[in-house]
Amino acid sequence: MNEEQVTVSNVEDEIAANSMTYTRFKTAIDSGKVLLRSPTQESLDKVEKCAIEVGDTFFLSETDKNLLALALELKSFACEPQIVTDDYSIQNVGKRLGIEFVSLATFGIRRVLEWMRYCPACHKEYAANSKVTECTICGTELKRKPRKQGKR
């Protein structure tokens, strides 16, 4: 494999210290097999805007957003970045941004999903980016589901 492997530094924060994964990650960084880079604010803003549009902004960590922004930036330099992840929110935003992904343990998403939030008790619908976590009518905790294609 001749491709360069890059990631963002906050990935380290999401790996359990003293685990085998942490040891492998540190070794890859120390040996130069994986390079650390930071995305620009402009790329982060584009990712945030896209995540809000599809309703995944509350389900992406800062690390997730940084990874997507870095991939978007690499893409702008005529690279073909791939994110290796089973996280559907990363895949969903990545697909909308034209970023390729590879799943490890799942089949991955087949199409971009636009989410909506709803109350499972009274069925009131909320915008996907609503900060409300409980139904304003009955107080039930909100859930999310993909919006049916063709509905907005």
Image: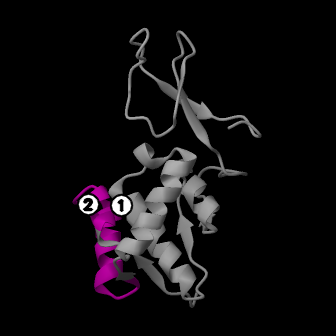
Q: Nearer the viewer, residue 26 or 124?
A: 124
**Where does residue 128 sit, x and y in percent of width and height?**
51, 37
Crowding at label 2, few (<14), some or many (≥20) Cα neighbours within 10 Å?
Answer: few
Side of 86 where 135 appears, left or right: left
* Residue under the image location 57 percent in, 48 percent down: 54
Residue 82 location, quadrant: bottom right
Q: Amino acid at mark 2?
A: Asp
For discs 2 and 1, the disc positioned in front in the rendered view: 1
The rendered magenta stretch, by its main secondary structure, is classed as: helix
Seen in the picture, residue 33 relative to 7 is either above or below; the reply is: below
Q: Amino acid at mark 1?
A: Thr
Residue highlighted by disc 1? 63
Seen in the picture, residue 6 relative to 92 is either above or below; the reply is: below
Residue highlighted by disc 2? 13
* Residue under the image location 51 percent in, 82 percent down: 74
Name the residue furthest bottom: 2
- Residue 87 can be seen, yes or no: no
* Residue under the image location 77 percent in, 40 percent down: 150
Name the residue furthest right: 150
Comes first in the chain, label 2 or label 1: 2
Q: Is residue 130 magenta?
A: no
The boundaries of the magenta stretch are 10-34
Q: Is residue 20 magenta?
A: yes
Secondary structure, mark 1, is: helix
Q: Nearer the viewer, residue 102 or 40?
A: 40
For the N terminus, the quadrant is bottom right
